[in-house]
Image (tube, rainbow, N blue to C red):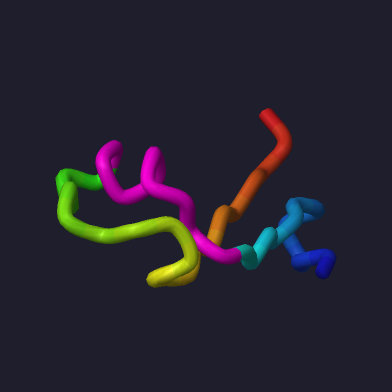
Amino acid sequence: MTTELNGSILIRAGVAEDFIAAGIEDHRSGDGTVVQLSLPR
């Protein structure tokens, strides 16, 4: 998906490392969704 800010949005199933990085350590892979917004510098 392209945004008006010339960035991109990635939506995917979360993995254990994503939840640990967010401070949620009791989730398994595939238990949630990660939405990542990337903008050019």
- Position of residue 18 relative to residue 5, above or below, is above
Q: Position of residue 28 (x, y in %)?
A: 34, 58
Residue 23 figure quarter: top left
Left or right of 26 on screen, residue 5 = right
Q: Which residue is drawn at 39% across and 45% down?
A: 18
On the image, the x and y values in percent for residue 14 come to 48, 58
Which one is in front, 2 or 15? Answer: 15
The residue sitting at the top extreme is 41
As drawn, 2 above or below 8: below
Instruction: Name which quarter of the figure residue 27 lies in.
Output: bottom left
Q: Dividing the image into 4 quarters, which one contains the C terminus?
A: top right
Tally of marks: 0
Quadrant location of the N terminus?
Answer: bottom right
Query: From the viewer's perspective, is 30 left or right of 9?
Result: left
* Magenta region: 13-21
Query: Which image quarter: residue 13?
Result: bottom right
Counting from the top left corner in percent of width and height, residue 26 is at 17, 56
Residue at image point 29% right, 37% down: 21
Residue 30 versus residue 18: which sits nearer the camera? 30
What's the magenta bit mostly, secondary-structure-wise? helix
Q: Does the magenta stretch include residue 38?
A: no
Classify residue 27 as left or right of residue 8. left
Instruction: Indicate the position of residue 19 as horizontal and vertical percent values.
Output: 31, 50
